[in-house]
Image (cartoon, rainbow, N blue to C red):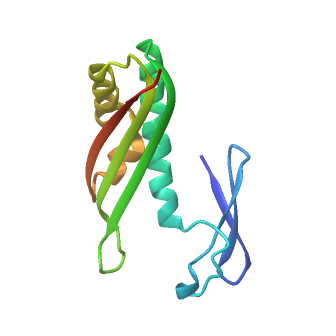
Amino acid sequence: MEAKATLTGGMHFDVSVGSGYRLEIDASPDQGGEGRGARPMELLLAGLAGCTGLDVISIMRKSRQDVTGFDVVVNGDRAEQDPKVYTHIRVEYIVRGRNLSEDALKRAIQLSEEKYCSASAMLGKTAKIETSYRIVEEA
């Protein structure tokens, strides 16, 4: 895997990743940036949301669960001292569907946390990661 960040001015970087996608990173205005892109620490949370989200939806589909919508919301608290790592992360899974099995969802989350999600395994070295879920029944 590879990522390349190219300074385009101020504190703004154009980032390309090995899979061919591009994104923008910038510092917040209070840190000398213009706020024209995501903050690097936000992207770590986004990576966790995507990593565990891919795991959980895949497992739920293999379990033949009728999922009609799915959100993963991740919030994190950082240390006050540099390097200001994440110390506490909360992951909430919001699953919409018909006749969803709570046990299937709990198992999917557990497998993601304990076996599959490398982002969770890595961030869990510095942060306490708490998970919760909501099932929203749809007609």
The image quarter containing residue 39 is: bottom right
Q: Name above or below for residue 127 compared with residue 80.
A: above
Q: Position of residue 16 (x, y in %)?
A: 70, 56
Marker count (numbered): 0
Return the x and y of residue 119 as percentages of the image width and height. Answer: 41, 46
Q: Residue 96, relative to residue 86: is it above or below? A: above
Residue in front for this viewpoint, 32 or 69 = 69
Which image quarter: residue 97? top left
Image height check: is 8 above or below 62?
below
Q: Quadrant of residue 94?
A: top left
Q: Residue furthest front?
A: 139
Residue in the image at 42% along x and 21% along y: 60
Task: Tell me if 52 is positioned left or right of 87 in this view.
Answer: right
Residue 63 in percent (x, y) is at 40, 13
Residue 77, given in percent of the width and then of the height, sits at: 32, 66
Please give left or right for residue 33 compared with residue 125 in the image.
right
Residue at the location (49% across, 49% down)? 47
Q: Which residue corresponds to the image point at 42% horizontal and 38% vertical from the top-left?
A: 52
Residue drawn at (34%, 26%) of the image = 108
**Relative vertical location of residue 38 with respect to residue 57 in this rendering, above or below:** below
